[in-house]
Amino acid sequence: MTEPSKVIHVRNVGHEISENDLLQLFQPFGVITKLVMLRAKNQALLQMQDVPSAISALQFYTNVQPTIRGRNVYVQFSSHQELTTMDQNAQARGDEPNRILLVTVHHMLYPITVEVLHQVFSPHGFVEKIVTFQKSAGFQALIQYQLCQSAVLARTSLQGRNIYDGCCQLDIQFSNLDELQVNYNNERSRDFTNPNLPAEQKGRSSQQSGYGDSGGMYASGAGAVAFPQVGIAPMANAAAIAAAFGGGLPPGISGTNDRCTILVSNLNPDRIDEDKLFNLFSLYGNIIRIKLLRNKPDHALVQMGDGFQSELAVHFLKGAMLFGKRLEVNFSKHPNITQGADTHEYSNSNLNRFNRNAAKNYRYCCSPTKMIHLSTLPQDITEEEIVSHLEEHGSILNTKLFEMNGKKQALILFETEEQATEALICKHATSLGGSIIRISFSQLQSIRENSQ
């Protein structure tokens, strides 16, 4: 282990983790004098007032796995004995100009393709190559300009801006690469200097219609980056939404609602918190932010990714039982929740379910049931361990542990919908046997030999 230091090095610090989250993790052990967020590396450096405080923190977190917003973070002594001005300047990382930009897209509610990125970055100079990929930090892209000055101009103009209204925020730094290697021209990579490259065998260009071929969806105003949201949502028309549900919308769903914020009332204020609400409402769409109303402790506001997702949540959760109370779920008069000290941000949470496989997740939407489905389980998990993890929430009538596509999954049948709902919101994204488990409602009525 590195020699004890009052500087603590924290790893796996996701974009959803704020400075305040880290402060809360370490404040019980003493005064924190400096904090440096190394966003590009998903890391942070934190300086305690003295070495004994840092030792106390690390001794505690040797026995207790520190977790922030459902994500395990890892702590150790830093090789630095003191944070210097140079270390603190590391927050302004990636400042050595280069013609290649590393772009991270946060709060990505809509798909971002090569075409979209080219539309955004080409006004600042000739873009030679674009490569996109998914990393722990989120969706990222490398964009190579012909000239370094074009990259500098693009970074200055676009840093912190949104591609679409209210989402898809650009975080731009200079890459240290000299040249991008592009093997295929498709929606994930493109060499604009060599149009004759083949498309990858598994290219899915047919799915991209509606994103790159409609010139009217992009703003043409001077310097405008925030493209109008109308018409670009991945589920923006009734046919696309119906396709996600296998041909038709669920009864009672119009698919035309544009109100994103939900008012939830008749909550049990002694048992509920923002993360539990997130676990429940994220079954129906991505969550932007949640606010518990301090002047009305049994009320909360939940802002969903779009109007269709909020309509699903209102439809399926209205009247659901939770902690002895029957939920009242309605559209709010507020178009969104204003950010503040009393709001919890989830727009960049890696626990949002609809960033990937959105169509599949829409198909699984339903009202709370007595049966929950567990996935991302450890390969060596037993039914006894699963029951032990969940039985505090109610009477478990039946269980089934099975394997699908080489991955362990389970079905758990509770006596009531309320018990199953409590288990889901309390235990989704918790650690079981070293794995962060995923829980959703199952529409199966009973457990048989052939499972979901």
Image (spheres, helix red, strand yellow):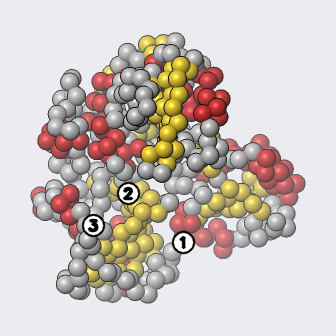
Q: Relative to the observer, which residue lies in front, 386 or 362?
A: 386
Among the two numbered marks 3 and 1 on one chain, the one whose residue lies closer to the N terminus? 1
> For the residue marked with disc 3, what is the amino acid?
Lys
353 sits left or right of 234 in the view: right
Rendered image quadrant of residue 394 = top right
Neighbour class for label 2 at 10 Å: few (<14), some, many (≥20)?
Answer: many
| Cα–Cα gap, marks 3 and 1 | 36 Å
Looking at the rendered image, the quarter that the N terminus falls into is: bottom right
Rendered image quadrant of residue 218 = bottom left
| Cα–Cα gap, marks 2 and 3 | 28 Å
Vertical placement of residue 60 versus 439, above or below: below
Task: Please tell me which residue is depicted at 59% across the width and 39% down the height of the picture.
Answer: 430
Q: Nearer the viewer, mark 2 or mark 3?
A: 3
- Residue 361 is situated, as x and y percent measured from the top left of the image, at 34, 41
Q: How many marks?
A: 3
The single residue placed furthest to the right in the displayed view is 52
Label 2: which residue?
Answer: 169
373 sits left or right of 426 in the view: left
Label 3: which residue?
Answer: 202
> For the residue marked with disc 2, what is the amino acid?
Gln
- Residue 90, can we see it? yes
Label 1: which residue?
Answer: 93
Task: Please tell me which residue is depicted at 38% across the width and 57% down the height of the picture.
Answer: 169
Among the two numbered marks 1 and 2 on one chain, the one whose residue lies closer to the N terminus? 1
